[in-house]
Image (cartoon, helix red, strand yellow):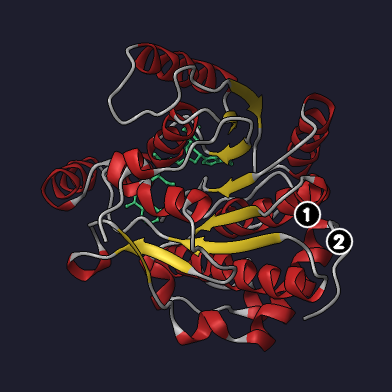
């Protein structure tokens, strides 16, 4: 299949929320969605970085890029969203509800990878807290808007091929007894998929016209890989990561395609998993794929759901699947 951002259906009149929209894949997704006419709400933990990114996107769209279909690009609204702070997540949802009547697409994209152990404002291990629990809470807050919007609406959650190395350590979810930065990342990315599929099952059981889909970008050259070495002051590893990105990573533009496909393409079903279909699923055009056996474990998904509701205090008005 050949699918790139010029293949995206028109998005005029549709509203999308993208988390982590100021950088990497979230930036590219915001650019592409607005270039096809969507009103994009960019959820960013730094308003300055968000506004700078939005201004750059507006300038790029003003040049009328060949791939963009909308004669008038959609709008870009930057809103503060720190997924490592449940109060910030709740305020984001309140501001969104005050300013927008509809929500067609929620892209749960923001993330951190392999950083030294730290905790969110609510005391959660940072990778589990930001990558999974923050998005769990955000989706719960926005579910009403997704359900009240006419037609099929979608929740897309960004995972990683690294989820295949993950397991959910229910006896030490926050990695207090032992911390392995890659193990914590893998757990958080497996949690993203367990959540995406369980959400879809529960939406289905409720007869809701919202579908939930998982995706991953393969290997894309973004700021993600630098954050861990930067935090550790590991200069040699930082430059090794940058070199590896340049040699082996696909562009962020291409890395954003699975998320954009999952969010907008026809023929996407709830519970699908979309990633690059080329070499080792690290690059190439988007294609539907299978994720790890563990990611389809319904008992683990159900248990994680209950724990996530208890930890975040955000409950979903959906029946168990
Ligand atoms: N790049 C890859 O090869 C790759 C592979 C597999 C999966 N992924 C996944 O793709 C997603 C996007 O990553 P990327 O590659 O685009 O990396 P990136 O360029 O570093 O972008 C990550 C985004 O997440 C934001 N973010 C981090 N912590 C946050 C928080 N507490 N609250 C709100 N936003 C926060 C960042 O904001 P700041 O700019 O303020 O830090 C940034 O906007 C992640 O979920 C990652 O796990 C990426």
Q: Quadrant of residue 61?
A: top left
Which quadrant of the figure shows ligand 1? Answer: top left
The quadrant of the image that shows the N terminus is: bottom left
Give x and y (percent) for residue 96.
76, 31
Taking 221 as reference, is 132 above or below it? below
x, y percentage for residue 290?
41, 78
Q: Which mark is residue 140?
A: 1
Q: Residue 316 occupies which quadrant of the picture?
A: bottom right
Please name the residue shown 69% across and 68% down the image.
199
Is ligand 1 less than 8 Å from the beta carbon at label 1? no
Q: Is residue 235 left or right of residue 211?
A: left
Residue 214 in the image: above or below residue 17:
below
Q: Residues within 10 Å of mark 2 (few under 14, many from 20)?
A: some
**Disc marking residue 197:** none
Horizontal side of residue 269 vs 285, given as left or right:
right
Give me the residue at 30% from left, 22% from top.
Answer: 65
Task: Look at 46% across and 39% down and name the residue there.
Answer: 26
Taking 299 as reference, is 3 left or right?
A: left
Q: Residues within 10 Å of mark 1 (few under 14, many from 20)?
A: some
Residue 180 in sight here: no
Q: Earlier in the sequence, mark 2 or mark 1?
A: 1
Residues at marks 2 and 1, CA–CA distance in whole angstroms:
7 Å
Front residue of 270/22: it is 270
In-image side of 318 versus 186 (left or right):
right
Q: Quadrant of residue 296?
A: bottom right
| Residue at screen point 10% across, 48% down | 247
Tell me the quadrant of the picture where the C terminus can be found: bottom right
**Are circles 2 and 1 on residues that touch, CB within 8 Å?**
yes
Label drawn at residue 315: 2
Which secondary structure lies at badge 1? helix
Residue 168, image x, y percentages: 57, 78
């Amino acid at each position: 299949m050949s699918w790139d951002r010029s293949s995206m259906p028109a998005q005029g009149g549709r509203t999308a929320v993208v988390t982590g929209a100021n950088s990497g894949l979230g930036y590219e997704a915001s650019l592409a969605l607005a270039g096809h006419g969507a009103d994009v709400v960019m959820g960013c933990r730094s308003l300055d970085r968000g506004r700078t990114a939005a201004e750059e996107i507006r300038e790029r769209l003003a040049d009328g890029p060949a791939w963009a279909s909308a004669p008038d690009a959609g709008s870009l609204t930057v809103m503060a969203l720190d997924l490592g702070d449940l109060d910030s997540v709740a305020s984001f949802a309140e501001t969104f509800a005050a300013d927008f009547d509809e929500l067609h697409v929620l892209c749960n994209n923001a993330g951190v990878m392999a950083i030294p152990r730290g905790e969110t404002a609510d005391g959660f291990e940072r990778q589990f807290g930001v990558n999974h629990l923050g998005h769990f809470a955000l989706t719960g807050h926005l579910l009403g808007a997704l359900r009240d919007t006419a037609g099929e609406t979608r929740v897309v959650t960004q995972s990683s091929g690294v989820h295949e190395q993950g397991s959910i350590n229910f006896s030490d979810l926050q990695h207090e007894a032992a911390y392995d930065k890659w193990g914590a990342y893998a757990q958080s990315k497996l949690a993203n998929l367990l959540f995406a599929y369980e959400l879809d099952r529960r939406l289905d059981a409720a007869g809701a016209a919202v579908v939930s889909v998982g995706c991953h970008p393969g290997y894309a050259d973004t700021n993600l890989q630098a954050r861990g070495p930067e935090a550790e002051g590991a200069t040699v590893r930082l430059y090794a990561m940058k070199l590896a990105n340049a040699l082996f990573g696909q562009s962020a533009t291409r890395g954003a395609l699975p998320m954009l496909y999952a969010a907008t393409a026809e023929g996407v079903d709830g519970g699908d998993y979309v990633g690059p279909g080329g070499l080792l699923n690290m690059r190439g055009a988007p294609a539907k794929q299978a994720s790890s056996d563990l990611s389809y474990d319904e008992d683990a998904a159900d248990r994680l759901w209950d724990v996530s509701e208890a930890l975040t205090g955000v409950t979903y008005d959906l029946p168990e699947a």
